[in-house]
């Protein structure tokens, strides 16, 4: 089962930044991590990840570097920057407020606001 | 696999910035190959596995268009507009200089058009390659500066071009070399000071006091941006001011000290070095608020600097304080734009180049305006994009073109891709 793709719009960059906060990753690895952590709920059209990664890099929130593989090919890894960590904290607060507002309206469980 | 190659070609066919094609292809190829292996492991044949891999990455045209939008090289419009305004005002200022200036204005107009075209084209040039050659540019810059000081052995015109190229190479080398240093190593801090101080001291030794002072002040901005600790930065800045200061006192020629004395008491040296400061005071004083009107100008300044370092005085005489303020405003707009964008780039040689370029222009603008108003000693510092000096104009437009290249590649508040905006993206 997957969720309505409209629900994910606007959140993918936050998901990506959250994963990169843990460790540097390459594109395919990010997709797999999101699939695994969401237990298959978030299934991407995988190419859409790259415009997001390149935009984050352009904004200075992540930086990329190439790493050699045994096969001779290289992988492009992305690492979050200090600015990216700051931006992620802001997006998390925003997400918290959004979720609480949705919960209040839809009658879900309301968590106390932490920010 | 031809299917995978075709897919990558399709994506890149939509990306106009060819400089990113190889990287995009390499990155997407790795992803496609992983998907291909997955599909093979699931029992598909090679053809079907390749088709599945491409399908999972998405429609190549849509992906290519998204990547094109992100990687498109654009000249910062406001930056370009502020440069154009300052350059056009520069032509007007040249036109108002005493004598028949029409031919000069026409020649400068052609140069200005070429310069602006260079700035528009420059984002296509990858400045990073140039800055990566700092170890070659640094000695080359010093050599050119040395050659330009050989006096009568080098024709004046050639000396001016050698000098402008020497300054250009030095600024580029500084940006590249400082970016490469390890900011946590004490040894690299001293290396940075050496890089910054050497051309300044060399210029002082060659009696080029004004360029030395301009470079010394520019080097402060570069050191401030280089990323050393606050303590190192302050110590370094003090050294970069004190070292050339002491060197000047030790190496200054008598005529240079006489000029300094004439700045402090121009009336006492009215027949010598005090003449120009007194004339400049008269030009400005006679202009009043609205000026004497275009065409009503004296011609009492030495012809050598009339179209160059003193060019502002006749303009302010004819257009008054209002004209002077408009020019200052245009120059301020241009510098402000450059400085703001330099602040947006936090790391790397591009950031240093922007900071260095902004400081290099700011020092000359402030000095020239200060000198015309009698606040700073009179010396051969022209006004960027206003004074008539082909070699320096070449240097200025080249620096601005490189800055435009940095801006085109710099992090900016980009709009999110369609998939994030709630358009026709996929999730």
Image (cartoon, grey):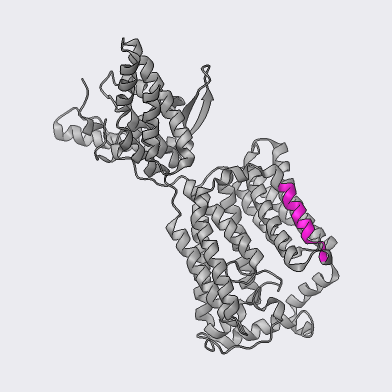
Q: Which residues are magenta?
A: B138-151
Please check the rendered image and state whether residue B150 is part of the magenta-colored stretch, yes or no: yes
Q: Residue at x 29, y 21 (%)?
A: A38
Give the quarter of the figure containing the C terminus of chain B.
top left
Dividing the picture into quarters, in which one does residue B177 lie?
Answer: top right
- Figure check: B401 above or below B371: above
- Figure check: B126 above or below A13: below
Q: Nearer the viewer, residue B201 or B141?
A: B141
Q: Position of residue B173 (x, y in %)?
A: 67, 47
Q: Position of residue B68 (x, y in %)?
A: 38, 42
Q: Is residue B324 visible?
A: yes
Number of numbered markers: 0
Q: Residue at x 27, y 19 (%)?
A: A40
Dividing the picture into quarters, in which one does residue B176 lie?
Answer: top right
Seen in the image, is B180 located left or right of residue B124? right
- Figure check: B188 above or below B153: above
């Amino acid at each position: 089962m997957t969720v309505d793709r409209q629900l994910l719009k606007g959140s993918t960059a936050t998901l990506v930044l959250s994963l990169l906060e843990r460790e540097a990753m390459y594109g395919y690895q990010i997709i797999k991590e999101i699939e695994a952590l969401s237990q298959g709920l978030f299934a991407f059209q995988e190419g859409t990840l790259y415009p997001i990664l390149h935009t984050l890099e352009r904004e200075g929130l992540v930086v990329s570097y190439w790493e050699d593989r045994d096969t001779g090919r290289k992988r492009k890894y992305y690492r979050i920057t200090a600015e990216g960590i700051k931006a992620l904290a802001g997006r998390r607060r925003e997400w918290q407020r959004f979720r609480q507002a949705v919960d209040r309206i839809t009658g879900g469980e309301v968590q106390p606001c932490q920010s | 696999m031809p299917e995978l190659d075709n897919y990558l070609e399709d994506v890149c066919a939509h990306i106009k910035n060819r400089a990113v094609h190889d990287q995009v292809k390499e990155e997407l190829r790795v992803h496609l190959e992983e998907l291909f292996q997955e599909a093979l492991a699931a029992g598909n044949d090679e053809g079907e596995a390749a088709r599945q891999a491409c399908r999972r990455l998405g429609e190549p045209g849509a992906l290519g268009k998204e990547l094109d939008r992100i990687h498109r090289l654009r000249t910062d419009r406001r930056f370009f507009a502020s440069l154009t305004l300052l350059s056009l005002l520069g032509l007007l200022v040249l036109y108002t200089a005493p004598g028949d200036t029409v031919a000069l204005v026409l020649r400068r107009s052609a140069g200005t058009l070429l310069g602006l075209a260079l700035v528009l084209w420059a984002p296509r040039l990858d400045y990073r390659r140039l800055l990566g050659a700092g170890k070659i540019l640094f000695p080359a810059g010093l050599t050119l500066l040395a050659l330009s000081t050989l006096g009568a052995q080098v024709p004046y015109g050639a000396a001016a071009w050698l000098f402008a190229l020497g300054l250009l190479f030095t600024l580029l080398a500084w940006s590249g070399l400082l970016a490469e240093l390890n900011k946590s190593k004490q040894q690299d801090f001293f290396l940075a000071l050496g890089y910054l101080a050497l051309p300044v001291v060399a210029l002082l030794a060659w009696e080029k006091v004004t360029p030395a002072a301009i470079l010394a002040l520019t080097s402060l901005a570069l050191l401030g941006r280089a990323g050393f600790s606050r303590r190192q930065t302050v110590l370094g800045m003090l050294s970069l001011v004190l070292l050339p200061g002491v060197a000047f006192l030790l190496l200054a020629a008598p005529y240079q000290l006489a000029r300094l004395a004439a700045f402090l008491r121009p009336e006492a040296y009215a027949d010598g070095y005090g003449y120009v400061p007194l004339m400049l005071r008269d030009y400005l004083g006679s202009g009043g608020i609205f000026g004497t009107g275009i065409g009503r100008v004296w011609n009492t300044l030495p012809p050598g600097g009339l179209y160059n370092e003193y060019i502002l005085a006749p303009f302010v005489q004819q257009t008054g304080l209002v004209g002077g303020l408009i020019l200052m405003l245009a120059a301020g707009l241009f510098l402000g734009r450059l400085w703001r964008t330099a602040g947006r780039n936090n790391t790397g040689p591009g950031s240093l180049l922007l900071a260095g370029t902004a400081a290099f222009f700011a020092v000359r603008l402030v000095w020239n305006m200060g000198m015309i108003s009698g606040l700073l000693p009179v010396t051969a510092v022209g006004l960027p994009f206003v004074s008539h000096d082909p070699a320096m104009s070449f240097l200025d437009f080249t620096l601005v073109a490189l800055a435009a290249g940095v801006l085109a590649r710099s992090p900016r508040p980009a709009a999110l891709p369609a998939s994030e905006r709630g358009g026709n993206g996929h999730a």
